[in-house]
Image (cartoon, coloured by chain):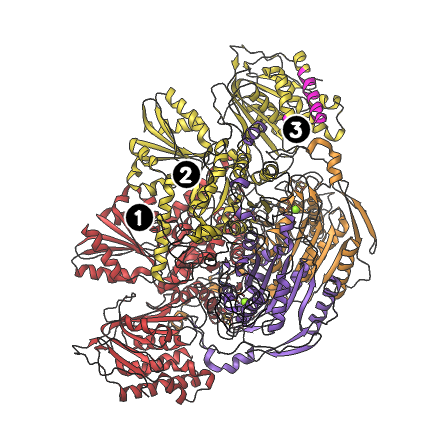
Chain colours: A purple, B orange, C red, D yellow
Amino acid sequence: MSENVKTNGKPSNIKLNEIGLSKNDYRGQPTTLCAGCGHNSIANQIIAAAYELDIVPEDVIKLSGIGCSSKSPAYFLSRSFGFNSLHGRMPSVATGASFGDRRLKTIAVSGDGDTTNIGMGQFKHIIRRNVPMVYIIENNGVYGLTKGQFSATAERGLTLKYQGANPYMPVDVVEEAMASRATFVARSFAGDASQVKALIKAALSHNGLAVLDIISPCVTFNNGDDARHSYGWGREHNEPLHDFSFVPREEEIQVQDFTEGETRTVTLHDGGQIVLRKIEKDYDPTDRVSALRIMEQAYTDEVMLTGLIYIEPERPSLHDVYKLPLELPLNRMTEKELRPSKASIKEVNAAMF
Amino acid sequence: MSENVKTNGKPSNIKLNEIGLSKNDYRGQPTTLCAGCGHNSIANQIIAAAYELDIVPEDVIKLSGIGCSSKSPAYFLSRSFGFNSLHGRMPSVATGASFGDRRLKTIAVSGDGDTTNIGMGQFKHIIRRNVPMVYIIENNGVYGLTKGQFSATAERGLTLKYQGANPYMPVDVVEEAMASRATFVARSFAGDASQVKALIKAALSHNGLAVLDIISPCVTFNNGDDARHSYGWGREHNEPLHDFSFVPREEEIQVQDFTEGETRTVTLHDGGQIVLRKIEKDYDPTDRVSALRIMEQAYTDEVMLTGLIYIEPERPSLHDVYKLPLELPLNRMTEKELRPSKASIKEVNAAMF
Amino acid sequence: MAATKTKETTKQETTERIVNDFSMTIGTMNGSGSQTSNLTLLRALFKMGIPVSGKNLFPSNIQGLPTWYTIRVSKDGYLARRNTHEIVVAMNVDTFVEDLQKVVPGGAFYYGDHLKFDIDRDDIAIYSFPAKQFAKESGAPAALRDYVANMAYVGVLATMLGIEMDKIKQALDFHFKGKEKPIKLNMDVIEAAAAWAAENLESQDPYRVERMDETKEYIMADGNTAAALGAIYGGVQFASWYPITPASSLAESLTAQIGPLRDDPESDEKTYAIIQAEDELAAIGMAIGAGWSGLRAMTSTSGPGISLMTEFAGLAYYAEIPVVIWDVQRVGPSTGLPTRTSQGDILSTHFLGHGDTQNVMLIPGSAQECFEFGWKAFDIAERLQTPVFVMSDLDLGMNQWMSKPFEFPDVPMDRGKILWEEDMKDLKERWGRYRDVDGDGIPYRTAPGNKNPQSAWFARGTGHNEFAKYSEDSDMWEENMQRLSRKYESAHSLMPAPVLEQGKNAEIGIISFGSTDVAILEARDLLEQDGQGTDYLRLRAVPFTKEVKKFIEDHEVSYVVEMNRDGQMYKLLQLEYPELTAKLKSLTKHDGLPLNARWVSSAIIESEAK
Amino acid sequence: MAATKTKETTKQETTERIVNDFSMTIGTMNGSGSQTSNLTLLRALFKMGIPVSGKNLFPSNIQGLPTWYTIRVSKDGYLARRNTHEIVVAMNVDTFVEDLQKVVPGGAFYYGDHLKFDIDRDDIAIYSFPAKQFAKESGAPAALRDYVANMAYVGVLATMLGIEMDKIKQALDFHFKGKEKPIKLNMDVIEAAAAWAAENLESQDPYRVERMDETKEYIMADGNTAAALGAIYGGVQFASWYPITPASSLAESLTAQIGPLRDDPESDEKTYAIIQAEDELAAIGMAIGAGWSGLRAMTSTSGPGISLMTEFAGLAYYAEIPVVIWDVQRVGPSTGLPTRTSQGDILSTHFLGHGDTQNVMLIPGSAQECFEFGWKAFDIAERLQTPVFVMSDLDLGMNQWMSKPFEFPDVPMDRGKILWEEDMKDLKERWGRYRDVDGDGIPYRTAPGNKNPQSAWFARGTGHNEFAKYSEDSDMWEENMQRLSRKYESAHSLMPAPVLEQGKNAEIGIISFGSTDVAILEARDLLEQDGQGTDYLRLRAVPFTKEVKKFIEDHEVSYVVEMNRDGQMYKLLQLEYPELTAKLKSLTKHDGLPLNARWVSSAIIESEAK
Ligand SMILES: Cc1ncc(C[n+]2csc(CCOP(=O)(O)OP(=O)(O)O)c2C)c(N)n1
Ligand SMILES: Cc1ncc(C[n+]2csc(CCOP(=O)(O)OP(=O)(O)O)c2C)c(N)n1
Ligand code: SF4
Ligand code: SF4
Ligand SMILES: [Mg+2]
Ligand SMILES: [Mg+2]
C-alpha cells in the first residue's frame, strides 16, 4: 500500500492503495444499524481487508439474506454489485450468481437466524458444494430485525423478555461446518478487529467456501438477564407496537489485540461475558482430527475458540468441478459461443428418429 | 409373549402376544416396493418390534415424507393412524402430530433424499427439539422414487448412469445427528434383522428423538459400476420415458447375526460391498467424546459402524418441556378445558384500556 | 433556554377554536422510545371520551431512522388516516424540514429546541420547547434520559391542547402496569413540561381538545392482540409461528396472554403449546400435524411466510386438515415494504397451491372482529376440514384501534364432524374418511388415539379413495375433487355475512373489506356532503354469501375499493358473478399507507363525473 | 404350448379389413422393461409412414404395479388418446380380467399363455402366445429373460398386423444406439415370435397396418427432450433442478444433450452448468442468482416444486430478474397423481407470489413448440426482465409425439436491454436500474463483472427507487408498481400469438391450449360430421394477444376447453375480457388422462343442444 500519493495529478493526502483507490472507494451507504451493533464492526473490516488487498470493487459481488446482518452489504463496497435476497436463501442465490463471472470474488453476509434457522438446509448444502466464496455469519443468537426472538444459536436456557427460556440445544455454526466438511472454517469476535480482518483476508484467497462464524453482539435485543435488569423499567413493559423503549447508544465493543493461545474475557454491552480463546500458534489447521479435538475441548471449557480452525485448500471448488472458463466469463458469452450452428439442427432432428 | 393361545374362546394356532394380538394385527398393506428393496426388511422389523413389545397398534402414529422409503408406513401397522406428508417435511408434521395425544408412540420413516436433501433443515431442527419419536432414515444414497438421482448421502465420486460422478461431499446422517446433539443416535443395516429390530425396540422406549440411520440398499438404482456393467446392455440406453429396463428380482439381503466388536463384509445386489462393524460390547454410548472418537475412527477405516452410538436419556423431551398432560390428552379436551369462562371476558376487556 | 429563533411572534388571526377535530403527527427517531409517549397521548385522549385513532408509520429498521405517529382526534368519530396534519411535533433532526412543511396553513408546529433550524413559515403557529431540559432535571439515570425526553412533548401538548393530566396518569399507569417508579419518572417530566408550557407558551392556533362522552363503550386494542385473545377463547391448542413483521405480535400476544386465561392453577399441565418454528415451512407443517391429530391449530405470518406455506396449504386443502392461518398482510410482492400495510394477498391466497384449490378466507374489519374471527376460524376450519385463512393487515394488526369490547362467543364450540369411540359404535355403514355421507361434501374424520380399530386412516396428499386408501383411479380422482367443490359450495353458508350500511338516496354501492372500513365510512359522509348517497357492503369472507350478489344487482354501479394494485377482490367478484361484472368498478390504492377517506370520495366523484 | 384354453375357435364374421385405424393397448407390469417393446412398436409404425401416437399410463411406483401403453394408429392423423381399445395385449396377471373387458366387440385380444384365465368373451378374437418360450430359447442370460420376454408380443403383432420387420429393426437400432448385442438378442426373440405367429395363429379380426407416406415430414420426440434441445439452442448457461416426475427428464435430457452440441472440442472449458440442487427452493434460488449475474438461467419442475418456488418467484418478479421456469404439470393439488397429466397450475402460477404479481406464461402445444419455446423463453425473459413460466404437462413432456422437425431459431438471440462497459460510455443520462427510459416499463440492466464504476446496483426484494436504492417512499413504491404493470402491458405484444384454425360454417369457437391440441383437432372433425362447424383458437401465452379478443368477439359462444377442475384459463379470460364473459363457456376434464376428442365433441353438442 502506498500512502499519501498523488493520483491523476491531483494532490491528495488520502491514503491510496496499490491500485490507486482510497478507503472511501470501498465504503458503502451510511449504516442504518443500531449504534454499537457488532455488524458494523464487521463491515468495517470487510472494507479494510478489500482496501488492503487492493481488490477492485467491481471485481466483487456481495450477497445476503434478510436480517440486520443481511442489510450490511449495503454498508460496504458501494461499487460492487449486490444482492439482498430472501430470508435463508442467500446460499442458493450466491451459488448461481457466482457462475456469471468466475473471476469475481463473492462475499456473502448472513445472520444466525438467516443461516441456522430458515437457512439451515441451504447452508449445509452450499458447504457440500464448496462454492468459492466468503460466507460470514454475523452471529448474535437472536433475530435482530424482527426484534429479539431466539435464533437457533441461542444457548439452551437463555432467557429473553417476551420469549421465556430457550428450551432447545443451540446450533454451533463451526460444528455444523465441520460436519459438512467445509474446506475453510473460522470463528472470530466482531470486536477483535485485527483477527476479523486477517480471517477475511485469508478467506478471500481461499479457493472454496470459507465459513466465518463471527460472534457479533446485538446491543438491542440479546441482553442477558442482569443487564436487562440494570436498564431498569425502560424495557419492562409489554409493548404491542414492538417499539422497544430503550436502546443504549454505545460504541462497538473492541478487543485489544491478544496473542494466539491466550484467553480473554470480554464484557458485552449487557454486562454478560464471553470468554475468547485464540487458537495456539503451532496449531495445524489442516488436520481435521485436531480440529474436532480442540472444538470439543473448547465446548467442555465453555470458551469461544477463535481463529482459523480448519482449512483444506486442495479440494476443487464448484467452479473447478464445472470447468468454468477463466478468460471469457460465462456472462460475456454471446450467440457465437452459446447457440449451436445452424447446420447442427439437421443432425438433431435426424437423431430424434 | 404367549404362543398358540386361545382367545375369545376360539382355538387358534396363530401366535399371540401378551395383549392377544397376532403378528397380522401389526402388518400393513402389501408392499408395492421393488422385490429386494431394503425398505421392506425394515418395515418387517417395525412389525416384529411392535408385536414383540405388545404395543397396541392404535397407540402408534406413523409418519413419513415422500419417496419409496416414505411409502413404507403403508406397509406396516394398518391399524395405526398414518400421515404421508410432503417431501422433506415429515419432521414438522410429526412434531405437531405428536402433540395430539402424548401417550401415543410416534414412528417416522424417511429417505436419505427426504431427510438430507430437501429435508435437511427440518431434520436438524427436530433434533434440537428432542421430539419424542423414532426417526428412521432408510438410507440408500439415491432418490429411488424419482428413478435414481444422487441424494446427499451418495459418496463423493459415486458414478451413476445419467448422473455422472457425484462431485459433492456426502452427508453423514449420524454425524449430523451428533452435531445437533441428538439424544439417541444409532446406525444399522437393513439386512441385519436382529440388530434393526433391537434398535427399533430401544428407540421406541427412548423419551426423546431417536435417530436410526439404516443403510437400505436400492436394488434398482444404486448399482455400482461393476454391477451395472454386469447387468449388461439392459440398462445401457437412454430411455426418455424413464422406465428402466431391468429390475433384478431378488431377495432382500440378510446378514447373519454377528457379534459386537466384529466386522462383516456384505455384498450388495449390485456386487458392491460395504463393511459393517458392530460397536464393541463394552462401549459406553452415554459418552459423547467416545462417540465422536469411534465415528472418526470408522471414517478413517472406511467401515460402517453399526449399533447404538450415542444416548442421552435424561434430556427432557419436547412434551416434557411443554408440560403436556398425561391423563387427558390434548385432543380429547373439550370446550370445558379449552374456553375460558364467560366471566373472564369482562376482565379481558377491562385490561384492554 | 430559547436558543432557537422561535418565531413566537408569528401571530395569527385566531379565528374560532377547533375542538376535537384534527390530526397530529409526531416525528421521532425509531428506537428512541417515543412509542410510550405517543400511546400515552392516544390513551389520554381516549379516556377523555374523544374518538381517536393512532397510526404508526415506522421504518423497517431497529434504531435511528425516522418514524411518525399520527393521532387523529375526531369528534365525529372518523378514525381513518388523513393526509393533512394540523399539528406536527418535530423531534427528529433528520426530518425537521419536511415535518415543518407538513403543517396545514393555520396549523401548529412544535419542536424540541435542541433542533437548530431556520424556520421559514409564517402561516402557522410555531412553538419550541426545551425537550432535553426536563429529562435532565428529572433525575432520571443518564442512560434513560434520551428516552424520557420524549415525555416532554406529552406535557407541552397537554397544556396547549387541554389534555387532562389525570387521564395521562391513567395512561401511564396502564402502560407500566402500575409500577410506581417508571410512572413517577415519566409523570414528573410531563408535569414539568406542562408547567413550563403554561408559563412560556401562548397558544396561537385554534386546535383544542375537550372532554366528550363518545368512547365509554369502547376499548383500545390492536388487531393482533385481539386475534390472539380470540384464538384463546376459540380454544387454540397449538400455535406454531415464525417471526415476521407485522405478524409477530400476534403469536407473542398469544404467548403472553394464554397462561392467565387457560392455565389451571391446580395443575402444572397445559392445555396448549406455542412453538417458534425454524421457518414458515415448519410452522405450517407443525400446525397441520397438530390439526390432523385433532387439535385446534393455527399459525400466523405475513406475505413471505404465506408464499412459503404454498405447498403445505395444498396438502391441507386436499387431505382436508383443519388449520387456521393468519395472514397479517404487509406490502408485497417479495419482501416489499415490510412495515407498510396492504391487502395484496387476496388473490394469491385464495388460489394458494398448485392444482385446483379454492381457499376459504375470513376478513376482519376491526379489532373486535379480529377477536371474533379468532375463535370462529377454528369452528369453520373444523366444520369444513380445510385451511381457513384470516386476512388481517398491518394497520389493523399493529395499530391501536377504538373497538367495541370483545364479546364472549355466542355459540358453543363447533368441533365439526369428528368421531370418537362412542360415535363409531353407532355407525350403520362402514366409516370412510372421505365419504360424503351427508351430501354437503364434508366427510367425517377421526383423530389419533381413537381406539376403535376401524378408526385409523392414512392421511396423504396423493390420490385416495373414500377410505383414504391410495388410488390412481381417474374417476375416483375426479369424483373426490368434485366433492371438494361441493364442500366449497357448502362453505358459502358458513361464512360471516357482509355488513350492509345503507345510505340516503344511495344510487351507487361501495364494496370494501378489512381495515379500509373506517376510511369508507368517512368517505360516505364526504360523498353525501357532495350529494352522492352510497350504500356500503363490507365483505367479511370469501366465498361470498348471497347478500353480495343481491347488493351488486341492486346497484347501478358498485365501487370495489381495496388496497392493492390489481383489484384483487374485484377480480374475485368478477369470477364469482361474471354476469354482473359490468356493474363493478375497481378502485385501488397501494402506497402502503392506511386508506384515506378523501382519496376514496374523490376517486368516486371523479369516476361518477365521467 | 397352449396350456390355456385359448378360444381360438371363436370365429367372427370378418367383415372388411380395417387398416391403419385403431387403438392398441398393452398391459404390463411396470419395471418389467416393456417400454422398449412398446416404443419399438410405435417407432416401427411411424417408420412405416403411418401417423401414430403413444401414451404411457404408468403408476407412481418403480416396479410391480400395472402400467398400460396405448398406441393409436390413425390414417387420418388423429393423435389423441381414445377411450376405446380395438386391440389389447395382456401381459400382466393382475389386470388380465379388466384388460379382457376393455376390448371393443369385434376387436382382438392377445395374451401371454403363462397367464391362466378362463376367457368369457366370444365377441372378440382371442390369441394367446408362448411369451416366455421365445425368451428362454433366445439364449438370453437368465437375468434378462423376463425383460426380453416382452419382445414376444412385438413379434406376434408384427405378423398379425403386418408391421414390417425392417422397420422394427430400425427402431431397435435407434433404441440401442446401434449396439449389436442387444439389438440381436431382441431381434431374435421378435423374429422367433413372428415366425411362431405366422405358423400358429390365424387372424380373426379386421385390424391391420399398411405402409403409408404420412410421417416423412415428422420426427418423433417427447416434449421434455424437445424443451431441453430448445434451451440449448437458446444458449442456456445455467440450469438448476430437483428431481420430480414428470419434469426430471427435461433436466436429464439437457445433461445428456448439451455436451455434444455445445462443447468446444478444443477446450475443456464449458459454456454452461447444470446443477442438481438440494430442493426446489435452492433450484430457483440458484437460477435467479445466475439470471442476475447475466446468464441465461432456467429451472424445471412440476406442481409441488412450483409451490415451493412461490416466494422466489415474487422476488424475481419484483427485482426484475430474467429466469425461465418450466412447469411440466401433473395432477394436483398436493402430491396428487404424480404420473398423470393436467393443466391445473394455470391460475396459481399466473398469480404466484404474495402481493400483486402477474406472471408471464408460455404454453407449448406440441413437441416442436416445446423446442421453440425452449429458446424463445430466454429471449422473452431477458427482454422483459421477469420470470417466464413455460407450462408444459406430463402428456406433452413424457410421451412420444409425432412432431414437425425442430426449426433453427429464426431470429438472433435477444439479450434485452443489458448494458456493458461500451454501452454505458454513450449514456446521456445517469443510468438507473429501474428507470423507465423508453416508456415501455422495461428498464436497463447491468451484470456483475461490468467494470464501469456506475454500473453496480443492489438487487433486492424490498422497496427501491429508480436507482435501486432502498426506499420506503409511498409514491415511489406505487409508481414502480405501476411501471411493472406497464411492463406487463408491453409483454402482450411479445407473446406468441395464438394459432387460429378456421372451420367451415363455423358458428362456435373453441379455445384451448397445450397438449389438448390433438384432441381438439379431432373433436372439430367429429363436430363437423355432426354438422357443427367450429373455429379453433389455440392459446400459446398469457398475457393474451389481441387476436384472442377478436376471436371471442367474433363468435356467439366460445368453449374454453381445459384439463383442470375449475376452468382456470376460462377464469383468466374472464378477468381479461369481462365484457365478453357471456360469450365464454367453460368445459373442463380433470381425470388425469390425456384429453379425449369424443368427450370434447359430446360435451359441446350437449351444451349446444341446451
Ligand atoms: C420468509 C421470511 N420469514 C420471516 C421474515 C422476517 N425476518 C426478517 S429478518 C429475520 C431474522 C433475522 O435474524 P438474523 O438472521 O439472526 O439476523 P440479525 O437481524 O440478528 O442480524 C426474520 C425472521 C422474512 N423476512 N422472511
Ligand atoms: C417438493 C417435491 N419435490 C420433488 C418431489 C419428487 N420426489 C419424490 S420422492 C423423491 C426423492 C426420494 O428420495 P429418498 O428420500 O432418498 O427416498 P427413496 O425413494 O430413495 O427411498 C423426490 C425428489 C416431490 N415429491 N416433492
Ligand atoms: S437490532 Fe441488534 S442486530 Fe439489529 S442493528 Fe440493532 S444491534 Fe444490530
Ligand atoms: S426403486 Fe429402490 S428404493 Fe425404490 S422400491 Fe425399488 S429398490 Fe426400493
Ligand atoms: Mg441474529
Ligand atoms: Mg433414498
Task: Give the Cα separation between the discs numbered 2 and 1.
Answer: 35 Å
- Chain that bears disc 3: D
Marker disc for residue C546:
1
- Chain that bears disc 2: D
Marker disc for residue D541:
2
- Of residues D407 and D275, the one nearer the viewer is D407
Secondary structure at numbered mark 1? helix
Indicate the quadrant where residue C121 lies: bottom left
Q: Main secondary structure of the magenta part?
A: helix
* A265 lies above or below B321: below
Label 2 sits on what residue type?
Answer: Ala
Is residue D245 rendered magenta in the image?
Answer: no
Q: Which residues are magenta?
A: D174-194
Q: In this rendering, does residue D91 appear at all?
A: no
Check contact, mark 3 vs mark 2: CB within 8 A: no
Which one is in front in this view, the residue at disc 2 or the one at disc 1? 2
Which quarter shows the N terminus of chain C?
bottom left
* C440 lies above or below B306: above
What residue do we see at 82% from left, 59% from top?
Answer: B281
Are the residues under badges 2 and 1 in a single subunit? no
* D406 lies above or below B269: above
Q: State yes or no: Cβ of the residue under disc 2 lies below 8 Å from any atom of ligand 2.
A: no
Task: Give the Cα separation between the discs numbered 3 and 1.
Answer: 65 Å
Are the residues under badges 3 and 2 in a single subunit? yes
- Tag 3 residue: D177
Whichever of labels 3 and 2 marks the residue nearer the N terminus, that label is 3
